[in-house]
Image (tube, rainbow, N blue to C red):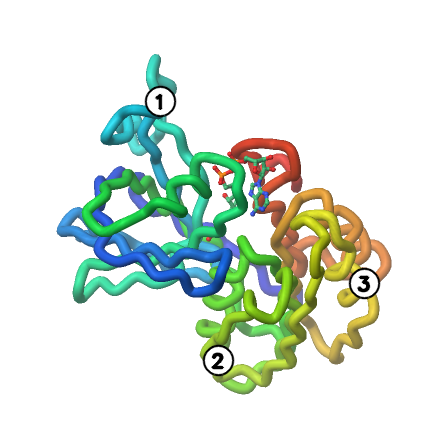
Amino acid sequence: MGLPQSTIVRHPLTYRLLEVRRVVRITPSTVRVTFGGDALEGFREQSPTDHVKLCFAEPGADLPVPPVIENDMWVAAPVEPITRDYTVRYHRPDVRELDVDMVVHGGGVGSAWAERAEPGMRLGVLGPRGSEVVPMVHDWYLLAAEETALPALGRWLEMLPAGVRVIAFAEVSGPREEQRFATATDLDLTWLHRGDAPPGTSDLMERAIRAAELPGGTGFAWVAGEAGCLKPIRRHLRRERGLAKEQVDVDGYWKRGIANHDHHEDD
Ligand SMILES: Cc1cc2nc3c(=O)[nH]c(=O)nc-3n(C[C@H](O)[C@H](O)[C@H](O)COP(=O)(O)OP(=O)(O)OC[C@H]3O[C@@H](n4cnc5c(N)ncnc54)[C@H](O)[C@@H]3O)c2cc1C
């Protein structure tokens, strides 16, 4: 019998203009923005790593340029929206609300917008384009994330079946950045503190994963964070641990020195 395979479920590509309902600093560096509106009708998400493209306005403009969608595809146009990828932290269809946790890092358009977000502001939301459905039938899961991937880590922990063995590592600057996640899994979560080292420069996650004792049976490893830090982790899991391609998802969520890093480039 082969290993369980992931599948991609495609969703109709939809652009929505949503209004900010609430803004809460959940940690010193992370802002939870709750978007709302009737436009959320039909919004679909189902997997831990489901994400949208937030669409930002040009400097000085009030609203983003909407993307041009033809035949369910985003097509090139003379003027395009400024987009960045963000995870769907929570979706509450009953009240038409969507939460996104945005890291404020002092850098780009996403971070700057999050820093000044307040109720009443409007933003474009494109997607999710699809959901990567990882069969939740493995004997164990190895999960590792830094700040930008904590929303997805939270979703993994909330969605995985009760009692399944999970070994997780979460890298943040210090104790004040730690978050609490609800889970029914048999979870062993270790917070890693990088202190004053800038984000995306530490090998804490790599060292923790190398030292981790993985249970027997078949497992699945998901790791997300800064692309450069993840390279040795991807190699370690595939070559040294001998995990098969379908057991490993290591996703560069951002890359030092690069704006709007394309995470599909890292595979
Ligand atoms: C599938 C997916 C899901 C994601 N989910 C989330 C999420 O839920 N929440 C979230 O906050 N981010 C998330 N990200 C990461 C986010 O898209 C990037 O951090 C993005 O670069 C932020 O855009 P920006 O405009 O703030 O910075 P950009 O304009 O893209 O970059 C400007 C500069 O800031 C640097 N930079 C970017 N991000 C960081 C960071 N976190 N820390 C330090 N420096 C940084 C870049 O290297 C660049 O030098 C996700 C990415 C992917 C691919």
Return the residue at label 2.
Answer: 183
Name the quadrant containing residue 25.
bottom left
User: SS for tag 1?
Assistant: loop
Residue lying at 49% horizontally and 79% vertically, measured from the top left: 161
- Residue type at mark 2 is Thr
Residue lying at 73% horizontally and 48% vertically, measured from the top left: 201
In the foreground, 9 or 185: 185
Circle 1 packing at 10 Å, graded few (<14), some (14-19), many (20+), is some
Where does residue 7 sit, x and y in percent of width and height? 50, 54
In the foreground, 229 or 8: 229
Where does residue 176 sit, x and y in percent of width and height? 55, 69
Residue lying at 75% horizontally and 53% vertically, measured from the top left: 202
Total labels drawn: 3
Badge number at residue 80: 1
Q: Earlier in the sequence, mark 2 or mark 1?
A: 1
Circle 3 packing at 10 Å, graded few (<14), some (14-19), many (20+), is few
Residue 125 visible in the snapshot:
yes
Badge number at residue 11: none
Question: Is 203 displayed left or right of 4 in the figure?
Answer: right
Return the residue at label 3.
Answer: 207
Name the quadrant containing residue 187.
bottom right
Residue lying at 60% horizontally and 71% vertically, measured from the top left: 175
The residues tagged by marks 2 and 1 sit, at their Cα atoms, a distance apart of 40 Å
Specify the farthest residue to the top. Answer: 78
In the foreground, 6 or 88: 88
Q: Earlier in the sequence, mark 3 or mark 1?
A: 1
**Image quadrant where one finds the C terminus:** top right
